[in-house]
Amino acid sequence: MRRTIVEMPAMFDGMKLAAVAAVLYIIVRCLNLKSPTAPPELTYQDTPLNHFILKSCSLLTKEYIPPLLWGKSGHLQTALYGKMGRVSSPHPYGLRKFLTMPDGATATFDLFESLSDHCTGVDVTMVICPGIGNHSEKHYIRTFVDYAQKQGYRCAVLNHLGALPNIELTSPRVFTYGCTWEFGAMVGYIKKTFPQTQLIVVGFSLGGNIVCKFLGENRTNQERVLCCVSVCQGYNIYIYIYIYIYIYIYIYIYIVDVLAASLAALLFSTLVACSFSSFVSIFSR
């Protein structure tokens, strides 16, 4: 019995190679494997203090080499942390504090004591303002607090007004970009409760806007503050507001247009059905 072997044309092999090349190209582009590594670009004033900081923290001037494959893709990092971070995220223990504001609102923050002595022997407290709609129970905040505690820092984390699902609002307002009242109340509590402590102010995203505004509102707010760190801060909220309003109006008009078209189609089909029923009724007579 003879077996007939059908040879595929050379064009088929070329198509396979092209498909493999396309897949590899997509992988390389999605993972940003071709993006070069380089030292961070620093913008600072030429002062003795900044020179001392750069000399003391050489990591700021070194080239950052991320982990292979997934390290250059921000999307993949976010996806991996979103899945793995929920499993491996630490659970630092803290005490929740409640502060009554002048307008009747109830501000809350969580206080985490240090797990070791600070290397300088100085009492240092990090006052932390999370990102938009975030609080002390978020994974990235818990991870940050866990690292800070182990390095000898006390941490106070603001819970944005209205962000915690189990804390009821006691006034007709929630947190905003421009309001520093709750953060200021937390800082005031820390200064009063720990008169010997020095402060490091940390803000993430929206929190970066709030802490910078707080420090600039009054010079007395800067007392006992060693430094301020703003992480991923938005620099122009006005542009964001205009874009947000434009997108909102566009979506609103689109939804209204779709609903109007659906309603018109429904009314048209109903009228046609009624007319057809009347016609059939007349014809049957």
Image (cartoon, rainbow, N blue to C red):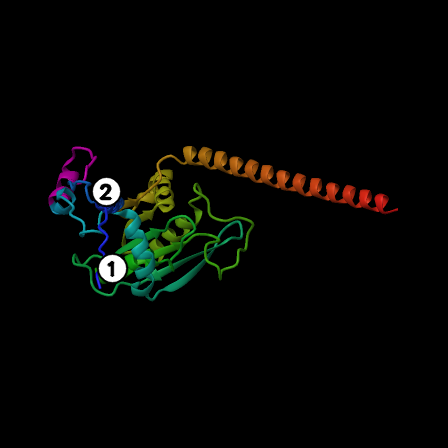
- Please report the residue visible at 50 percent of the width from the left and 49 percent of the height from the top: 174
- Please report the residue visible at 23 percent of the width from the left and 45 percent of the height from the top: 9
- Please report the residue visible at 38 percent of the width from the left and 49 percent of the height from the top: 131
Q: For this rendering, which residue is in front, 216 or 84?
A: 84
Mark 2, residues whose alpha carbon is within 10 Å: few (<14), some, or many (≥20)? few
Residue numbers of the magenta segment: 40-55
Q: For this rendering, which residue is in front, 165 or 114?
A: 165
Report which residue position mark 2 lands on. Answer: 11
> Which image quarter: residue 220?
top left
> Which image quarter: residue 4?
bottom left
Q: Is residue 74 above or below residue 149?
A: above
x and y percentages locating residue 189 in the rendered image: 38, 55
Q: Secondary structure at mark 2?
A: helix
Q: Is residue 263 above or below residue 139?
A: above
> Which image quarter: residue 268?
top right
Left or right? Give the position of 279 relative to 16.
right
Q: Amino acid at mark 1?
A: Tyr
x and y percentages locating residue 237 in the rendered image: 41, 36
Q: For this rendering, which residue is in front, 272 or 1?
A: 1
Find residue 45 and name its label: none
Magenta stretch encompasses residue 32:
no
Distance, label 2 to label 1, CA atoms, is: 58 Å
Report which residue position mark 1 lands on. Answer: 147
Q: Residue furthest front?
A: 1
The quadrant of the image that shows the N terminus is bottom left
Q: Residue furthest right?
A: 285
